[in-house]
Amino acid sequence: MEWLFEARWSPYAAGAGIGLLSWLTFLLSNKPIGCSTAFSRTAGMIEKKIRGDKAAAKPYYQQFPPVVDWEWMLVLGIFLGAFISAAISGDFRWVWVPDVWAAAFGPSPVLRLIVALAGGVFLGFGARWAGGCTSGHGISGTMQLAVSSWVAALSFFVGGIAAAWLIFRVLG
Amino acid sequence: MDLLLKTLHANKKAQLGLGFFAGVIFGFLLHKGGATKYDVIIGQLLLRDFTVVKIMLSAVVVGMIGIHVMKSLGWVRFHPKVGSVGMSLLGGLVFGVGFAVLGYCPGTIAGAAANGYLDALVGGILGILIGTGLFAALFPRFKRILVLGRFGDITLPKLFKANHWFVVVPVAALIVLLLVWLESSGL
């Protein structure tokens, strides 16, 4: 059982595990793994808290009601699962600024936070625009051989590679 | 079997528990694979470290074969998402920009926060909530873009009018070849 306590596994082992997990979610829950609607629902819950039922009347929240569902619980579970893995392998540590970012743009947590916040806005907006994220389209959709997901997954990487190049090769 | 599964699918409380359980395993595997780390994800987008692609493609190969076997047996139903050029391509490119600027995605950011990354926990998650909320607000104005070049929820086997195994086998073979090539070129 020592392998459970190792900080890193082969990416193929982790990936194959995610593939096997997909079999189970399709079979037991009739659901593909996906993460971004959970954020959309949470945004709706917060809006509902602040602005009341008027927020929940938005057409988008009619389509994706701001409630706790299977996928929301999945995202909540990710926190616990990743924490368990990090904690038992001695890999948990608080980090404000990741190494690669710090090497290019310095150790300022404020700059990194502002950029992370801005990146998050694009990511959340783009995920709902494309109708899914790296897991919903990139893994679950492509394995179902959905055309929408193959187009979206390739676009994620085209956009991501171009933007990363711009950030680190031109600005950095 | 069929009735048992249908009863399980309809049991809301059991499903919330199963969703949480699946999330725990997913988060565990994302961390073990290294995908909860900014440096690994940015390394992928800079084409220096192919960990993320290796995780995704091996998940797709294993998952694809299994769910198609179960589909042939009538055990599972598929849920292909609808798409269009305006939605999948344009939205995908915007997502990609966010992916590179943030350095996490909606699934891995939860794992990153639990790994101790405070830029994920404090900045990134708030940003994603703002982004999804903003899209919900602008959704009525986006409808025209979302239907541009619509291709619906079609799958590759339907597009080619072929039995799904005629697509699953070549796609699996191509992915395996790509992974072998990545390994042999030292990436």
Image: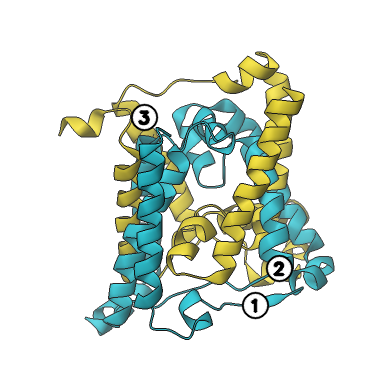
Chain colours: A yellow, B cyan
Q: Which residue is mark 3?
A: A86
Q: Chain of mark 1?
A: B
Q: Determine whether label 2 and label 1 are within 8 Å by CB.
A: yes
Examine the rendered structure and indicate whether residue B163 appears above or below residue A163: below
- Looking at the rendered structure, the kind of residue marked 2 is Val
Labels 2 and 1 within one chain: yes
Q: Chain of mark 2?
A: B
Dot 1 lies on which element? Answer: strand
- Looking at the rendered structure, the kind of residue marked 1 is Phe
Q: Which residue is mark 1?
A: B151
Q: Chain of mark 3?
A: A
Say which of B31 and B159 sits in front: B159
Does residue B79 appear in this view?
A: yes
Residue B97 rendering spot, x and y as whole percentages: 70, 44
Residue B87 rendering spot, x and y as whole percentages: 70, 65
Q: Residues within 10 Å of mark 3 (few under 14, many from 20)?
A: many
Of the 4 image quadrants, the one containing the C terminus of chain B is: top left
